[in-house]
Amino acid sequence: MQRMDRTALAARVARDIPEGAYVNLGIGAPTLVGNFLPRDKDVFLQSENGLLGMGPAPAEADIDWDLINAGKQPVTLLAGGAYFHHGDSFAMMRGGHIDICVLGAFQVSVHGDLANWHTGEPDAIPAVGGAMDLAVGARQVFVMMDLLTKSGASKLVEACSYPLTGLACVSRVYSDLGVFSVGQSGAKVIEMVEGMTLDRLRELTGIALEMA
Amino acid sequence: MINKIVETMRDAVADLRDGASIMISGFGEAGVPHELIEAVIAHGASDLTIISNNAGSGESGIAALIKEGRIRKVICSYPRMAASHHFERSYRAGELELELVPQGNLAARIEAAGAGLGAVFTPTGYGTLLAEGKETREINGRHYVLEYPIHADFALVKARAADRWGNLVYRKVARNFGPIMAMAARTTIVQVSEVVELGALDPEVIITPGIFVNRVVPTMPLSLA
């Protein structure tokens, strides 16, 4: 069976982002998606800290700490890019102006509930950032994650056990073992990696999956 | 003649009092008014409520205020960062209170305060732990949470340039919370790297009009600038 690594998965997500889309890429693995957007097409990357038309990382000599992304890494601004304050930035999300956001997750439910901000451990320092605003505001929420935890538990679940980030907000899950749609009518398999079967996916997730 | 330029950081924060609420601009390190925060530390005010996106990292800025035991409460969206050890220690020891607010709700509540709104209904956080116990309403089939404005006694903001009327322009994403915090606080104090003559800032590109600004302090002495 050919499991997809993070790079291959990022390339797979990038294929579903059309030209002209306004897109927010979450911290961590979703940031890699930016590396696979075709250079000859205009896709507008938004960063919650006040930047539209975000470009790739700068050369060492060109690093400017007043030009960073949500993960606090140095970035660049494309010609035609713009800066704005936090009120406008989150109006872009909440107001439905962002077409797609790509986020990581601890769990996603078959109905599209998302848990990605808190493990629920009493000792954990809670931090939410912009995750809840993106989950609720973006027109489509794509999740990028491994299908299973290190101990083999499915992260695609009937109902999330971790604290929720948003209700019924995720439309697609891109995982190392396959791509799923989630929502009102439950979870469906859009595609599987080579060597995977529907039965095996049902076994791994414990969910009565069907092909889309 | 109105001149909002104050010569020293110390003079700019002289009327701080114990128990004050202070908004501090910045996202990560971009836009953090470090020199003004240094002045707050030197001033000695304590029992402060800090409203900011993060809760400091390393040894300076908000982290230094926490280390010095000056903060009673932090209202922020993301206190957990690389090197946020002063926050973590103080929080775990029960020495400071945390009100965790989703980043967009933080912005909306600050904007509501600046715009004179009584509250806002926001979709963010509905059905989550961060909306527990809060009033909700369904409007046109969508669920909203009632969130109240966040006011503050002071806002400490970093901008790039100002004139003596307090008109501001910022630099790149160091703008972040600056413009909306400047609107929400009773007294807004701004540190800038450049003071310019009236009329030197293009009125078409002024981001914060001077009505929202009370004091401007250059980070370099005027005679050297």
Image: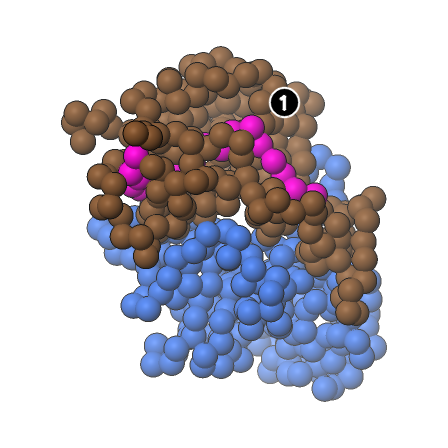
Chain colours: A blue, B brown
Pick the front one: B120 or B214: B214
* Label 1 crowd bin: few (<14), some (14–19), many (20+), radius 10 Å: some
- Residue occupying image coordinates x 64% and y 81%: A192
- Residue occupying image coordinates x 70% and y 47%: B119
For mark 1, name the chain: B
Q: Position of residue A156 (x, y in %)?
A: 73, 66
Pick the front one: A16 or B133: B133
Above or below B70: residue A99:
below
Give the total number of marks visible in the rendering.
Answer: 1
Query: Which stretch appears magenta?
Result: B148-164
Q: Is residue A155 left or right of residue B217?
A: right
Please state which amino acid type lies under the numbered disc 1: Arg
Of the 4 image quadrants, the one containing the C terminus of chain B is top left
Q: Position of residue A18 (x, y in %)?
A: 49, 81
- The residue to which callout 1 is attached is B72
Q: Residue furthest bottom?
A: A212
Q: Does residue B38 show up?
A: no
- Residue occupying image coordinates x 56% and y 43%: B114
- Residue occupying image coordinates x 56% and y 60%: A91
Q: Is residue A79 left or right of residue A54?
A: left
Pick the front one: B83 or A83: A83
Pick the front one: A188 or B121: B121
Above or below B32: residue B107:
below
Q: Does residue B150 show up?
A: yes
Q: Is residue B158 magenta?
A: yes
Res. B113 image quadrant: top right
